[in-house]
Image (spheres, rainbow, N blue to C red):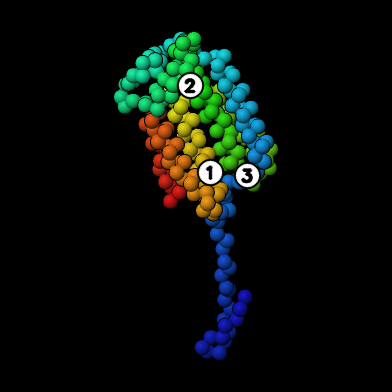
Amino acid sequence: MTQRPSEGGSSKDYRIPEKREQITLSDHRPTSVIDTRTNTIIALVVFAFTLIVYIFTQARTTSFWDSGEYATCMSILGVPHPPGNPFYIVFGRALVAIFGSFISHAIIAAFVSCLTSALAVMFTYLMTVKLVSMFKLSKWDAVFAGVIAACFTAFSFTFWMNAIEAEVYSGLVFFVNINIWLILIWVEKSRDFSHQNILLLIIYVFFLGFGVHQTALQIAPAILFIMV
């Protein structure tokens, strides 16, 4: 408190306003709360366990809806119903060309969903660990939250059903999740301009996801909001 003389000779009390603490992005950046080796091992265990469960429960032939169409398009490198899923079909066709002589094409088409779903679950774990790290919790709290989020994703009814049949949604979720994880990596390292090439990778992965399913476009506003 400071006294300031007034024009009439008397003093007047007034308070100097205190400077408020401003919360900025730097106060809530994702951090690497767990060492890379441990985090990678846990992520791979989550991926392997999920993939094994999906393989044992996957469809052995074509199932309902678009599965037969996608399996056929992978076999002949055909064009599915508009607006199309070019990257999904080309990737499946590559696996058919390699393994199609001794494995059913329907099984290969379903395996594509198993593989991309397991990868999506793995990146659910990784991005959850990054998100939880923003709240300054311990590393094992982050790991526990990541594993729980991965399990809830992997074995939820809708996700599991799409993971074991020839469908594009598992591939879509994979590309959305990896993009979110890359954005969190970029936010963590955005002060270091040597890591700005991550932006190019984010854009590249985004358009790969667009080639799987056009609803990948839904995360574009979030990407622009965080980066701009």
**Is residue 141 shown above or below 191?**
above
Q: Residue at x 53, y 39 (%)?
A: 181
Locate residue 175, reporting x and y percent: 47, 33
Residue at mark 2 to residue at mark 3: CA–CA distance: 30 Å
Q: How many marks?
A: 3
Name the kind of residue labelled 1 in the image.
Leu
**Is residue 83 shown above or below 226?**
above
Residue at mark 2 to residue at mark 1: CA–CA distance: 25 Å
Q: Residues within 10 Å of mark 1 (few under 14, many from 20)?
A: some
Residue at mark 1 to residue at mark 3: CA–CA distance: 11 Å
Q: Which residue is mark 1?
A: 184
Q: Residue at x 54, y 53 (%)?
A: 192
Could one spot residue 151 in this view of the protein?
Answer: no
Q: Residue furthest bottom?
A: 9
Instruction: Please state which of residues 42 and 198 is positioned toward the viewer in this rendering.
Output: 198
Q: Which residue is mark 2?
A: 113
Question: Which structural element holds mark 1?
Answer: helix
Q: Which residue is mark 3?
A: 32
Mark found first going from the N terminus, 2 or 3:
3
The reply to whether the C-beta atoms of the residues labelled 2 and 3 are less than 8 Å apart is: no
Mark found first going from the N terminus, 2 or 1:
2
Locate residue 55, reporting x and y percent: 55, 16
The reply to whether the C-beta atoms of the residues labelled 1 and 3 are less than 8 Å apart is: no
Name the kind of residue labelled 2 in the image.
Ser
- Is 34 left, or right, of 25 in this rendering? right
- Is 61 left, or right, of 45 in this rendering? left
Question: Which structural element holds mark 2?
Answer: helix
